[in-house]
Image (tube, rainbow, N blue to C red):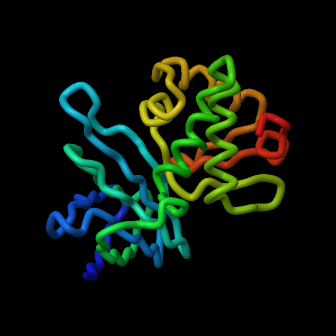
Amino acid sequence: MFSSVQLLEGQTFLLAPPDESHQCIQLSMFKGIARVSGSFGNNFTDITLAFCGEEEKNWICLPDESTLLLEAMTDSSIKMHYESNCPLHKDLMTQWLFDLHLVRHPIGAEARVVSLFQLLVNRFGIRRGDGYLLPFSLGHARIAELIGATRSTVTRQITILKQQNDLHVNNTQGHFFFSARLIESSLK
């Protein structure tokens, strides 16, 4: 069972099985980058679970009693194939679970912010001259959610990175441009 969707940046799409026998989705990203988020009861809404990008084929096993959304971080074109089961070694959320756990592991917000930026740039970044462009924007509140910190802490860390010339923000699009020194540092 196939479905295709075109999403503009910021638009969301509910990832729901067409019936009870099709609990897995194979996502084929033809264009763009998307974020997978989940809501788990009233206390845990809009939790980032994974990201997916162009030319990737990923599987998502839809958990029971939860709501998953696909949010376009950039304009996206996605084809979805619904299946009754998924290959566990290719489960997108399991892969990102490990990656995001490693991002949250370092002591100190600065190390966690840098670790997150390195992860995202290594997956989706574009090398430009003497640095790396992250081709989508992330708000301070979203970064805080991803690293387990407060928004004010993230804002303080981003200000420090700007002062050190390790981060520049495109004011019109909100995209981050990182120094090669920061992304290639040994915090990986």
Which residue is farthest bottom? 2
Relative side of 119 to 76, left or right: right
* Residue located at (70% from left, 30% from top): 161
* Residue located at (27% from left, 63% from top): 23
Q: Nearer the viewer, residue 171 or 181?
A: 181
Q: Count all numbered tags in the image, as a single digit.
A: 0
* Residue located at (42% from left, 31% from top): 141
* Residue located at (43% from left, 59% from top): 34
Using the image, determine if residue 80 lies above or below residue 16.
Answer: below
Residue 179 figure quarter: top right
Q: Nearer the viewer, residue 163 or 54?
A: 54
Q: Quadrant where the C terminus lies?
A: top right
Which residue is farthest left? 19
Residue 173: horizontal and vertical position, in percent?
Answer: 49, 53
Residue 142: horizontal and vertical position, in percent?
Answer: 44, 36
Q: Nearer the viewer, residue 135 or 184?
A: 184
Q: Quadrant where the N terminus lies?
A: bottom left
Residue 143: horizontal and vertical position, in percent?
Answer: 50, 34
Using the image, determine if residue 87 lies above or below residue 170.
Answer: below
Q: Nearer the viewer, residue 9 or 110?
A: 110
Residue 18 figure quarter: bottom left
Residue 124 figure quarter: bottom right
